[in-house]
Amino acid sequence: MLAVHARRPYSGAVTTQTQARQFFEDKIVQQAGAEGVLLSADERLMLKWSESAPDSIADYEDKIAGLLSRCYAREIAADRGAKKALADAFATLNRGDHYVLIMINRAVGRQLTPWWKFRLG
């Protein structure tokens, strides 16, 4: 659990997305503290996440995709049979809607997708 920070005084106009996000993040954290609701580090981190804000944790996807890509290369080099296990898990996960699929597809989606599933054109 992260400690609840002291209340920041409201200092006027909120003019940037970063300020607005921080404004609401502060409100949420303050209310959680007032109610005795614990926010995990992950929950606090997700308050900062944005697809569009340049100061966000958007590089998370690149970081995870890089880890998956290197894991794939390492496992395939060590055991050619590993590709089937990875492809089977990938196919199973593709039956649902999972955020991690974005990063898996970016990292190794082409290697794990059967050739006949690629569309031409």
Image (tube, rainbow, N blue to C red):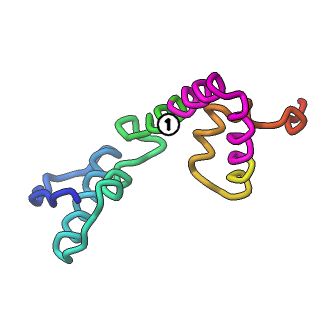
> In the rendered view, would you say 30 is above or below 67?
below
The foreground one among 12 and 83 is 83
Q: How many numbered dots are placed on residues in this image?
A: 1
- Quadrant for residue 28, please give it: bottom left
Which residue is rendered at x = 23% and y = 70% of the image? Answer: 32
Look at the image and say whether residue 76 sits in the magenta stretch.
Answer: yes
Task: Give x and y (percent) for residue 70.
Answer: 55, 26
- Quadrant for residue 10, please give it: bottom left
The N terminus is located in which quarter?
bottom left
10 on left or right of 109: left
Type of the residue with mark 1: Ile
Dominant secondary structure, magenta: helix
Which residue is rendered at x = 62% and y = 25% of the image? Answer: 78
111 on left or right of 121: left
The foreground one among 121 and 17 is 121
Which residue is rendered at x = 75% and y = 38% of the image? Answer: 84
> In the rendered view, would you say 86 is above or below 79?
below
Which residue is rendered at x = 20% and y = 77% of the image? Answer: 35
Look at the image and say whether residue 83 sits in the magenta stretch.
Answer: yes
Q: Residues within 10 Å of mark 1 (few under 14, many from 20)?
A: some
- Quadrant for residue 103, please give it: top right
In the image, farthest residue toward the top: 77
The foreground one among 58 and 9 is 58
Q: Secondary structure at mark 1?
A: helix
The C terminus is located in which quarter?
top right
Q: Which residue is mark 1?
A: 64
Task: Give x and y (percent) for residue 47.
Answer: 35, 55
Q: What's drawn in magenta, residue-wise?
A: 67-90
